[in-house]
Image: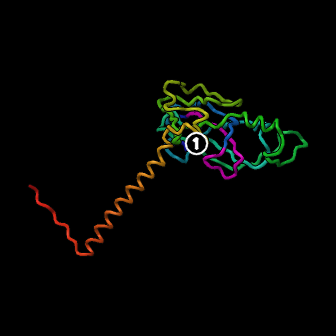
């Protein structure tokens, strides 16, 4: 991806226990990188001209001890500093092992009765979302994203300018997740998602009217009805 590093940017590492994630999945942040991601000390917009160029930097992070054990899915999300408003996301299946002492079972279900563990999981920040139709957009005017809730594990690379006035447009925040916007009874659908069903219904109605009009003309022609062009007066 060297030919498309978009001036660096900001990234997050998040985890969900939905093995087949959907738009309604809950992603909890375990590490945030503010600036200098996916490449540090970038002096040009892109690192070379080839999309197959490997990036030189490695990013280390620690799996938190409150992360439930067992099968999960990890996501890497990235917002470029210099690009059109986009949200890049790569996912990978993972297995969380250890982390809670030598006597811990290798695989424990998240639903087990462990109030301390589930409490920490519920308190972890939600993955930041923008540029996916949720009403929050990155302005992409040279400012890296400063995550509203980066979590306890945060790497900050000061090479990237932070300008809060040029960072976002629209409404941004935890409640602007698609999972929240799709939730029944949520009152925040003014962001544009609420208009899509109506647009779909309108398009179906227009298509139905056009089909009916064409069908009427075809049937009348079969019956010998001829349409004549009227001369202009």
Q: In the image shown, does 52 or 222 lie closer to the viewer?
A: 222
**What colouring style does the render use?**
rainbow
Instruction: Assess whether residue 22 is covered by the magenta stretch.
Output: yes
Judge left or right: residue 116 versus residue 218: right
Relative to 114, say whether 209 is above or below: below
Q: Which residues are magenta?
A: 9-25
Of helix, strand and loop, which one carries label 1?
Answer: helix
Q: Residue furthest right?
A: 103
Using the rendered image of the protein, determine whether residue 25 is visible from the camera's viewpoint. yes
Q: Residue furthest bottom?
A: 223
Q: Classify 10 Å Cα crowding around label 1: few (below 14), some (14-19), many (20 and above).
A: many
Relative to 112, say whether 145 is above or below: above
Judge left or right: residue 97 versus residue 198: right
Instruction: Assess whether residue 101 is covered by the magenta stretch.
Output: no
Residue at the image point whose x is 27% and y is 71% from the top: 220
- Residue 143 place in picture, x, y as percent: 51, 28
Q: In the image shown, does 230 or 9 lie closer to the viewer?
A: 230
Which quadrant does the C terminus fall into? bottom left
Residue that mark 1 sits on: 178
Q: Find residue 151 and report its image quarter.
A: top right
Which quadrant does the N terminus fall into? top right
- Residue 190 place in picture, x, y as percent: 50, 37
Q: Residue furthest left?
A: 233
Q: In the image shown, does 68 or 193 lie closer to the viewer?
A: 193
Judge left or right: residue 119 versus residue 84: right
Residue at the image point whose x is 44% and y is 48% from the top: 199
- Residue 93 place in picture, x, y as percent: 70, 50
């Amino acid at each position: 991806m060297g030919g498309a590093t978009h001036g660096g940017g900001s990234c997050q590492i998040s985890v969900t226990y939905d093995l087949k994630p959907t738009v309604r999945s809950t992603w909890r942040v375990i590490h945030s990188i503010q600036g200098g991601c996916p490449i540090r000390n970038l002096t040009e917009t892109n690192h070379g001209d080839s999309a197959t160029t490997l990036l030189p930097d490695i990013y280390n992070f620690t799996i938190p001890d409150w992360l439930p054990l067992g099968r999960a899915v990890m996501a890497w999300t990235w917002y470029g500093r210099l690009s059109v408003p986009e949200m890049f996301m790569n996912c990978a299946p993972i297995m969380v092992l250890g982390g809670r002492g030598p006597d811990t079972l290798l695989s424990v279900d998240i639903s087990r009765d462990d109030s301390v563990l589930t409490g920490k999981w519920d308190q972890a920040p939600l993955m930041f979302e923008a540029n996916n139709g949720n009403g929050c957009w990155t302005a992409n005017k040279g400012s890296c994203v400063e995550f509203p809730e980066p979590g306890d594990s945060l790497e900050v690379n000061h090479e990237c300018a932070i300008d809060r006035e040029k960072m976002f447009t629209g409404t941004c925040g935890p409640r602007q997740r698609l999972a929240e916007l799709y939730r029944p009874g949520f009152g925040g659908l003014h962001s544009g998602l609420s208009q899509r069903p109506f647009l779909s219904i309108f398009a179906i109605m227009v298509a139905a009217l056009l089909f009916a009009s064409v069908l009427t003309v075809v049937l009348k022609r079969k019956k010998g009805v001829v349409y004549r062009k009227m001369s202009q007066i």
